[in-house]
Image (cartoon, helix red, strand yellow):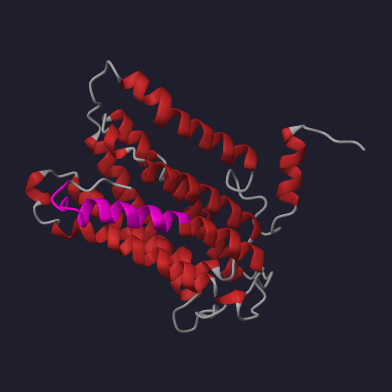
Amino acid sequence: MNVTLNPFTWSAEIVKMGDPRTKDYPLVTNPLFVFPLLFLYLYFVKVAGPRWMESRKPFDIVNVVRVYNLFMVTMSVLFLWVALPFTYLPGGHYSLWCQGITGDMTAEMAEYYKMGWIFIACRYADLLDTVFFVLRKKFTHVSNLHVIHHTLVTVNVWFYALFAPEGQPALGLTLNVFVHTIMYSYYFLATFGPQVRKYLWWKKYLTTLQIVQFVIIILHFSVPLFVDCSFPRHLIIIGNAQTLLILCLFINFYLKNYKTGASEKSMKRS
């Protein structure tokens, strides 16, 4: 039996098992990009970054963070502008209830997939959130919830971009982009300091919105477990397991910060 441990070989085999429509996406479906990126991310935000910043002053990068947040809002709005008419708005091609994998590649779908690539790239760019926290020495913001959330989202995005780039996950993806639009809008406004923050009384509802989002995603994603709509059930189980873990972490965060006398604490970005 000829067994090879060459990472390029097994990486190519994994990609070969994926959807042919996305297997050539640059930098997003190849595990040799995704998992080394996550390793570097975890090592920097948990080990190397805090150690490097220990004897340094926080970097003044408020303008960088401001531009970053505005960019993420713009990309999210652009995605919704293209994706919603193709999927769920009147005249769209997706069933809101149960959507399988068609395997089609029309001109319209090609445009949708291009926006899908932007969504994927933005979810990788989300990792910069934590990097900015480290560079600004806001180490309390680098919580387990924050790091686990970003790590699992990155893995999830890679996995479904490769194996199920259409179908039932599309609603959750669209809802997630909507939530990110609101979140990054809040973060952008918060960079302008106390004179603006006093109007951001709704910050705690961001966590509520995220919790509601995950509940909707789990319920909607579970439909093909009970209704045959040509979407692989094992992909649902994998996705829901990850989403359920993130949901539990967010509920725990909410209870600690808003239901135990800590409602006046500054909300940690997660």
Q: Nearer the viewer, residue 112 or 53?
A: 53
Residue 106, x across and y down, in percent: 64, 71
The quarter of the displayed image where residue 77 is located: bottom left
Q: Residue furthest right?
A: 1
Residue 177: within the magenta? no
Dominant secondary structure of the magenta stretch? Answer: helix
230 sits to left or right of 5: left
Please, is residue 233 above or below residue 65 in the view?
below
Residue 215, x across and y down, in percent: 41, 67
Residue 116, x across and y down, in percent: 52, 59
Q: Residue at x 60, y 75 (%)?
A: 224
Please, is residue 228 above or below residue 148 in the view?
below
Please, is residue 48 above or below residue 240 in the view?
above
Q: Residue at x 67, y 75 (%)?
A: 230
Q: Count of labels shown?
A: 0
The quarter of the displayed image where residue 109 is located: bottom right
Q: Nearer the viewer, residue 264 or 169?
A: 264
Q: Residue furthest front?
A: 260
Q: Which residues are magenta?
A: 245-265
Please, is residue 37 above or below residue 146 in the view?
above
Residue 260: within the magenta? yes
Is residue 140 at least partly visible in the picture? yes
Is residue 165 at least partly visible in the picture? no
Q: Residue at x 36, y 20 (%)?
A: 51
The quarter of the displayed image where residue 233 is located: bottom right
Q: Quick one: quadrant of the N terminus? A: top right
Residue 176, x across and y down, in percent: 41, 61
